[in-house]
Amino acid sequence: MSASDPVLCEVDRRGVASVTLNRPAVGNAYDGSLIDGLIATFDRLTAEKGLRCVVVRGAGRHFQAGADLKFLRHLRTVTASDNAEFSRRTVAAIRGLQCFPRPTIALIHGGCFGGGVGIAAACDIAVAAADAMFAISEVRWGITPAPIVPLLVDRIGSRNTGRFALTGERFDAAAALRMGLVHEICPPAELEAAGARFVDYILRAGPEAVTITKRLIAESVETPFSGEFHDRIVAEAASRRRSLEAEEGLASFAEKRKPRWYKGWYKD
């Protein structure tokens, strides 16, 4: 990995990965290289031993400014199959982030437009600087946000998606908070500290319990509450109470100490 790569990734000693969208000269607008970089990065992180969570940031002035319009003009000149292949990879990048097994946290500053809104929505937790601006802006360029529409309908509802995806209008961090696109807003200078606080919460939690809980949340959205799913939930709850991780978690609480899996540094 070099400093000029479109996506940068580092994993610290705690198992916290920092993923940085790294095309600051164009507001981290996505092109083929950034999409491929996201796919490769999260594929690699899936195999990372001891990984606890991922923090996604944007380099420079913006989190992510949507599509690189120069690249979109290029796509108009390629074959239909190549055009379709890029759409497939775009969906794969968003889906890979959404379904990543460990918790993901987006730290949003500056502009968060188009696909950037999709990245924010795909993360489990999103924190925005108070002066961040958002837009689902694709219709303004005569294109559609098709790769992120199902995700947005799930995360912020069809009414909010309908308004902002149909108008392409900009909205501020307060509106993003009201509709549930972000979970918290903070002064710009405190964005990293807010992210650190959420990281610390995750580090305090049992790693296996967090992974299983994330999977159950996703399955609950997509799976009818059938007899089979009911039985799985019952079995999961019962088996986790007998796990070694639960034994350590309950013991650490009773003994008023940090659990052995905790590697954090944040102090309440």
Image (cartoon, rainbow, N blue to C red):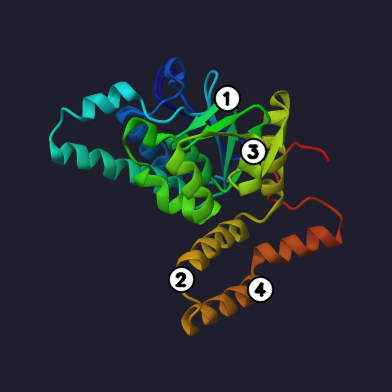
- Element type at marker 2? loop
Which residue position is annotated with label 1? 110
Looking at the image, tell me whether mark 3 or mark 1 is earlier in sequence order: 1
Nearest-to-viewer mark from 4 and 3:
3
Percent position of residue 223, x then y: 46, 71
Q: Spatial distance from mark 3 to mark 1, Cα to Cα?
A: 12 Å
Nearest-to-viewer mark from 2 and 4:
2
- Element type at marker 1? loop
Q: Spatial distance from mark 4 to mark 3, Cα to Cα?
A: 35 Å
Looking at the image, tell me whether mark 2 or mark 1 is earlier in sequence order: 1
Percent position of residue 241, x then y: 67, 72
Q: Spatial distance from mark 1 to mark 4, Cα to Cα?
A: 46 Å
Which residue appears at 42% of the width and 53% of the height? 150
Which residue position is annotated with label 2? 223
Which residue appears at 48% of the width and 54% of the height? 153
The residue lying toward the viewer, choosing from 127 and 156, is 156
Looking at the image, tell me whether mark 1 or mark 4 is earlier in sequence order: 1
Residue 122 in view in this figure: no
Which residue position is annotated with label 4? 242
Nearest-to-viewer mark from 3 and 1:
1
Mark 2 Cα shell of 10 Å, populated few (<14), some (14-19), many (≥20): few
Amino acid type for the residue under numbered disc 4? Arg
Looking at the image, tell me whether mark 3 or mark 2 is earlier in sequence order: 3
Amino acid type for the residue under numbered disc 2? Thr
Looking at the image, tell me whether mark 4 or mark 3 is earlier in sequence order: 3
